[in-house]
Image: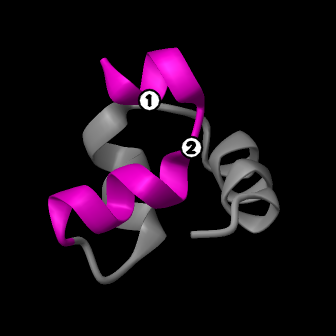
Amino acid sequence: MIYRATGHIRAIQILLGHSKIENTVRYLGVDVEDALLLAERTEI
């Protein structure tokens, strides 16, 4: 729900405790390319 509301994949990665963004992407079921672009633009 947080990802849908904010689009902040990096925040979700931190909240879930994932060490790799790829794990978070797989968990959320989003496109890897889109998720990586969002993660690069998000500063936490």
Give the residue at x 18% y 71%. 17
Of labels 1 and 2, earlier in sequence is: 1
Residue 35 location (% of width, % of height): 63, 47
Which stretch did the figure color magenta?
A: 1-17
Location of residue 27 (image quadrant): top left
Colour setup of the view = one colour
Classify 15 as above or below 21: above
Location of the N terminus by quadrant is top left
| Nearest to the observer: residue 36 or residue 17 | 17
26 to the left or right of 5: left
Which residue is label 1 attached to? 3
Residue 42 location (% of width, % of height): 70, 59
Location of the C terminus by quadrant is bottom right
Give the residue at x 46% y 68%. 21
Location of residue 8 (image quadrant): top right
How many other residues sit within 10 Å of disc 2, few (<14), some (14-19) or many (≥20)?
some
- Residue 13 sits inside the magenta stretch: yes
How many other residues sit within 10 Å of disc 1, few (<14), some (14-19) or many (≥20)?
few
Q: Say which element carries label 1.
A: helix
Which residue is label 2 attached to? 8
CB of mark 1 within 8 Å of CB of mark 2? Answer: yes
Q: CA separation, marks 1 and 2?
A: 6 Å
- Residue 16 sits inside the magenta stretch: yes
Amino acid type assigned to the residue bearing label 2 in the image: His
32 to the left or right of 34: left
29 to the left or right of 34: left
